[in-house]
Image (cartoon, rainbow, N blue to C red):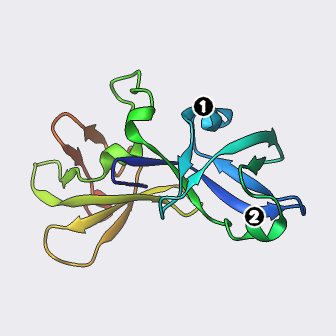
Amino acid sequence: MSGGGRVCIGQIGAAHGVRGEVRLRSFTADPKAITHYGPLESDDGRVIEIESLRPAKDHFVVTLAGVADRTAAERLTNTKLYVPRERLPQPSEPDEFYYADLVGLAAVDRSGQPLGTVIAVHNFGAGDLIELRRADGEPTKLLPFDATTVPEVDLAAGRLVVELPAERE
């Protein structure tokens, strides 16, 4: 979700119409706030500016600077949009955090034994998942990011507690 101190706050979907508009999914707490963070960046570093935004059924339809036709809009399909972490407000509650802040945290079991390191947070449509690079050298593991599997996140200590599914049975 993050790379180089950036946080993904949205994703461009399919082209909408023939005048260069695109569908946009916002990942910000207030979806309309995606326009408040200034120019956005793509994975490859392109600067993307939202000129106008209007709500649709489960997304927004937006006009982007420099995108004037359907062909240009189609080239942006599935582009993730990032902002530098420092442009985002600090979480207001002690138990709030950005998913980007989880990347790099140590994952430990309840007894403190290392399980690995969080390398990404994903959402493929069925809920959030953390991806762990395992301490034992085995392939990475995807785990549900929920209160049952991850009962504790301690950013100050640089770790989160993970209860593996096999341990709960």
Between 130 and 33, the one nearer to me in the picture:
33
In the rendered view, would you say 95 is above or below 34?
Answer: above
Q: Is residue 48 left or right of residue 105?
A: right
Furthest-top residue in view? Answer: 92
Between 116 and 111, the one nearer to me in the picture:
116
Furthest-front residue in view? Answer: 66
Residue 110: give x, y in percent of width and height: 17, 48
CA gap between label 1 and label 2 equals: 22 Å
Quadrant of residue 50 within the rendered picture: top right
Q: Is residue 32 left or right of residue 102?
A: right
Residue at 28% x, 40% y: name it.
Answer: 153
Furthest-right residue in view? Answer: 18
Disc number placed over residue 21 in the picture, else none: none
Residue 31: give x, y in percent of width and height: 65, 37
Disc number placed over residue 73 in the picture, else none: 2
Residue bearing the label numbered 1: 36
In the rendered image, the quadrant that contains the C terminus is: bottom left
The amino acid type found where label 1 is placed reads His
In the rendered image, the quadrant that contains the N terminus is: bottom left
Residue 59 visible somewhere in the drawing: no
In the rendered view, would you say 97 is above or below 27?
Answer: above
